[in-house]
Each structure stands twice: as structure tokens, then as C-alpha cells.
């Protein structure tokens, strides 16, 4: 009897999950742009992504969010940088606005070069050097973009990347292999008009290399603003170093990092910038300090925050392809060139600028979009919300910009790049018409 009841209950639950999946998928508005490459999670040759999608769609929203944030919690309080491994200064400082804005380049150990799951993830995203099909896609993209010259460079880059992958398989994680694939990000440092210091998308602040002293000489760090909910690996060390600062982050970040047992955390962030009221209060408070903050509403994967500081845009995770067709910045490596060809160029990229996963995660019909903390709205309005937010940012004038992945770039380049990557959102230019 009990077995029958359990069987009936389980059967009823499965029927509910399936029914809910079919009904909800039908009600979701697909993107207006065609995305040929779609994600899949193969298990014994069968794509189980629809099963995962059905499960997540059946969960109450708060439970789904909780599961995802727990899953995405950082695994460690510490991130290894170039000083930890090689004893070398990991920072390079560049003054952007004299006495007011600085860009800090930070070199650290790639966290996915040595992750056995990363290769599988990159294959799903569309960068697969191990298959002939994957390599041919790269060569096709190179041919389309730069003709025979591009193909020759791509062949060299494929050979170089395979060499590094083999070396990592042979030697594992060691100084020799770490040196092959450094990771670099850029932090913005801003001196407010009242003398306080704001860190944008912060990196860890070390005492050993003189960096901490340099920062102290500018002023007290009172504000820490996260640029993207996907950039939190260094935040625990920043919070430990500056426990008294005001933390301006999306709630998703707090919900992720609270799982670190050794981290002393306030019960809530000082400002959840995804809350329009809290953001408005903050902008009022900082109105005379030379900074204004813009949450990019609708951006599901990164919940991006753009800051305007003394005429400089501070940006994270919004710019991939630049007006010259390269991704990120001029420090091109074999890996960045292959990432560009495999993901950000035709035939794989739907708009010849962004990788397919940025489209998947904005698409409510795509099951993968359920596997992030903020899911796109079923009526498709996340795209129009994001376009509206970016237009608000682009109404501003910018002399310079600092991108977490681009480093310092001219203000016009920032505006053009945002439009180039995101004007597909509602099919219209994000830029103001020129008078
Ligand atoms: Fe990023």
C-alpha cells in the first residue's frame, strides 16, 4: 500500500514537472535573434539539459535561487597571484585622471586552466580544440574575418594551445604551467571629492609589494563596488582587509559568499545595487563626490554595474568585441585569439561580437538560463530592460573607460563597444543620434 502511495506520489510529481515544463516553455518569448549553437549536457550521449531545466522550472523561485547560489559559492577564501607563486609584483598601476582615477592591472593564477571540468565546459560553450569539427569552426571563422592570413595565425594558435594543454596534462599545476596561462583583470581606483577611496571590481590588496601603502596614500578605502555578480573570487580577501568599508553589491554576491565559513560578513550588504531605492539613495549620497552608479537592469548573468567616476566609465563583463574586431584588449594571446574566433565571430557568434552563452542566458526558452541566480523574464522583457539601462549609460559623456577585461580604453571606444556587443537586445542602436 505504502509503495503504491509513494509510487503514485512520485508519478504525480513527475507528471507535474513535465506538464509545467511544457506549459511554461510555450509561454516564454524566444529571442528575436537566431542563435544556431545551443547548449547541451551530454550523459552517455543523451542531452540531459531539458531534464535539469524541467526540474528547475518546477521549483519555487526562492528555492531555485538558493540552490544556484550555494552551487556557485566560492570554494576558497584565497586566490593565488603572481607574488604567491613567483614572488613577483602582480600589480601595474596606470593613472587615468590625474589624482582621481587609476587602473590597476592584476596578474593571478588562472582558476580554470587546471580545473578538469573546465575543458568540458569550454566544449559546451563552443571552444573545442580536441575535435576536428571544433578546429574547423575556428579556421572557418578566421577565414571569414581575415582571409588566408587569419587562417595561418589560427593554425599557429591552435598548435600553441594544444602544446600548453599537453604540458598541463603531463606536469599538472606547477610554476612552469602556471606561467603559460596567466589571468589578468583590471580594478578601478577612484578618489572621491571628499577624499575617500572607492574600489571598483576589487582585487586583493597585498602589503608585501608596496601596493597597500600606495592605496593608503590616496585615502581611506570606504567604498567597494562589485562590477559583476560573476566576479567574486577576490572579494573575501578584500572584505577581510577592509571590513569597515561600504559594500555595494547585488544580493546574489552576498548569498554566494556567505557560504565561506571563515569569512566575517555583515548580515546584508550596505547597498544592494539591484534594489532601485537603495541605488537611488546611494546616488543621492554620492552626488557631490564625482561618481554616479548605473545598474544594468535585465542583465541576468552578471547583474552588471557601470560607474561613472570623474568622466571615466568603469565596466565589467559587458565588453567582449572591440570596434577593431579583437576581444578585450591588445594583450592578445593564442588563447584569447582562439576564444574570439571560436565564440565571438561568425559562424558561431550570432552578432559577430558576443559568445553564444550570453544569448542563451538572456533567453527564457533556453533551459540553461534557469541555472543562474537571476533568470530572464518569460515575456522577453529582460532584453528591453537591459537595452534601456545601457541607453541611460550611453547618454553620458566619457573621456575614458576602464574595463575589468579590457583595461583602460578611450571613452568613445567604450561607447562604440557597448553598442557593438549589445545592440541586438531590441534590434536598435544604443547610441544617441549624433547632432
Ligand atoms: Fe568576467
Image (spheres, grey):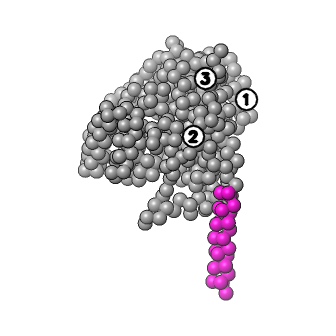
N-term mark: 1 or 2: 1
| CA distance separating discs 1 and 2 | 22 Å
In this picture, residue 21 sits left or right of residue 329: right
Point out residue 393 in the picture as x, y percentages from the top left corner: 64, 26
N-term mark: 1 or 3: 1
| CA distance separating discs 2 and 3 | 18 Å
Which residue is drawn at the image coordinates 51% and 62% (left, top)? Answer: 48
Res 308 label: 3
- Circle 2: is it few (<14), some (14-19), or many (20+) Cα within 10 Å? many
Secondary structure found at label 2: loop
- Circle 3: is it few (<14), some (14-19), or many (20+) Cα within 10 Å? many
| CA distance separating discs 1 and 3 | 16 Å
Res 281 label: 1
Point out residue 429 in the picture as x, y percentages from the top left corner: 62, 29
Which residue is drawn at the image coordinates 66% and 62% (left, top)? Answer: 22
**Which of 280 and 301 lies nearest the eye of the viewer?**
301
Point out residue 334 in the picture as x, y percentages from the top left corner: 33, 36
Note whether ligand 1 is within 8 Å of mark 2. Answer: yes
Image quarter where the N terminus lies is bottom right
Q: Which residue is mark 2?
A: 302
N-term mark: 2 or 3: 2
Q: Which residues make up the magenta segment? A: 1-26
In the displayed structure, 369 sits above or below 12; it is above
Which residue is drawn at the image coordinates 27% and 42% (left, top)? Answer: 159
Point out residue 101 in the picture as x, y percentages from the top left corner: 53, 19
Secondary structure found at label 1: helix
Q: Does the magenta run of residues contain 7? A: yes
Which residue is drawn at the image coordinates 58% and 55% (left, top)? Answer: 367
Image quarter where the C terminus lies is top right
In the displayed structure, 159 sits above or below 428; it is below
Amino acid at each position: 500500500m505504502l509503495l503504491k502511495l509513494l509510487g503514485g506520489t512520485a508519478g504525480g510529481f513527475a507528471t507535474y514537472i513535465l506538464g509545467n515544463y511544457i506549459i511554461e516553455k510555450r509561454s516564454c518569448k524566444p529571442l528575436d535573434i537566431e542563435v544556431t549553437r545551443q547548449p547541451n549536457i551530454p550523459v552517455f550521449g543523451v542531452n540531459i539539459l531539458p531534464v535539469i531545466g524541467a526540474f528547475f522550472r518546477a521549483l519555487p523561485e526562492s528555492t531555485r535561487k538558493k540552490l544556484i547560489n550555494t552551487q556557485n559559492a566560492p570554494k576558497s577564501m584565497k586566490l593565488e597571484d603572481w607574488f604567491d607563486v613567483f614572488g613577483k609584483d602582480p600589480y601595474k598601476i596606470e593613472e587615468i585622471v590625474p589624482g582621481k582615477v587609476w587602473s590597476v592591472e592584476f596578474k593571478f593564477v588562472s582558476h580554470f586552466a587546471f580545473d578538469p571540468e573546465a575543458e568540458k565546459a569550454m566544449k559546451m560553450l563552443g571552444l573545442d580544440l580536441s575535435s576536428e569539427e571544433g578546429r574547423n569552426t575556428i579556421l572557418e571563422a578566421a577565414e571569414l574575418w581575415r582571409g588566408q592570413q587569419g587562417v595561418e595565425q589560427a593554425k599557429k594558435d591552435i598548435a600553441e594551445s594544444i602544446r600548453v594543454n599537453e604540458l598541463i596534462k603531463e606536469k599538472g599545476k606547477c610554476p612552469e604551467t602556471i606561467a603559460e596561462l596567466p589571468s589578468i583583470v583590471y580594478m578601478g581606483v577612484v578618489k572621491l571629492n571628499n577624499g575617500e577611496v572607492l574600489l571598483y571590481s576589487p582585487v586583493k590588496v597585498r602589503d608585501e609589494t608596496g601596493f597597500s601603502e600606495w592605496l593608503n596614500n590616496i585615502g581611506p578605502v570606504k567604498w567597494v563596488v562589485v562590477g559583476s555578480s560573476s566576479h567574486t573570487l577576490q572579494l573575501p580577501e578584500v572584505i577581510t582587509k577592509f571590513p569597515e568599508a561600504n559594500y555595494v553589491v547585488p544580493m546574489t554576491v552576498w548569498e554566494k559568499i556567505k557560504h565561506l565559513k571563515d569569512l566575517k560578513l555583515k548580515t546584508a550588504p550596505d547597498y544592494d545595487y539591484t534594489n532601485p531605492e537603495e541605488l537611488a539613495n546611494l546616488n543621492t549620497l554620492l552626488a557631490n563626490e564625482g561618481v554616479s552608479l548605473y545598474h544594468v537592469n535585465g542583465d541576468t548573468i552578471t547583474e552588471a554595474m557601470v560607474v561613472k567616476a570623474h568622466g571615466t566609465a568603469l565596466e565589467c563583463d559587458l565588453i567582449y568585441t572591440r570596434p577593431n574586431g579583437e576581444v578585450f584588449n591588445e594583450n592578445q594571446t593564442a588563447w584569447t585569439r582562439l576564444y574570439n574566433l571560436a565564440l565571438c565571430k561568425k559562424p558561431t557568434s550570432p552578432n559577430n561580437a558576443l559568445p553564444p552563452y550570453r544569448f542563451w542566458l538572456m533567453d527564457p526558452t533556453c533551459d540553461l538560463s534557469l541555472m543562474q541566480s537571476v533568470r530572464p523574464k518569460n515575456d522577453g522583457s529582460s532584453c528591453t530592460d537591459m537595452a534601456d539601462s545601457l541607453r541611460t549609460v550611453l547618454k553620458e559623456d566619457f573621456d575614458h573607460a576602464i574595463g575589468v577585461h579590457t583595461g583602460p580604453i578611450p571613452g568613445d571606444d567604450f561607447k562604440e563597444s557597448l553598442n557593438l556587443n549589445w545592440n541586438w537586445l531590441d534590434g536598435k542602436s544604443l547610441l544617441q543620434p549624433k547632432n
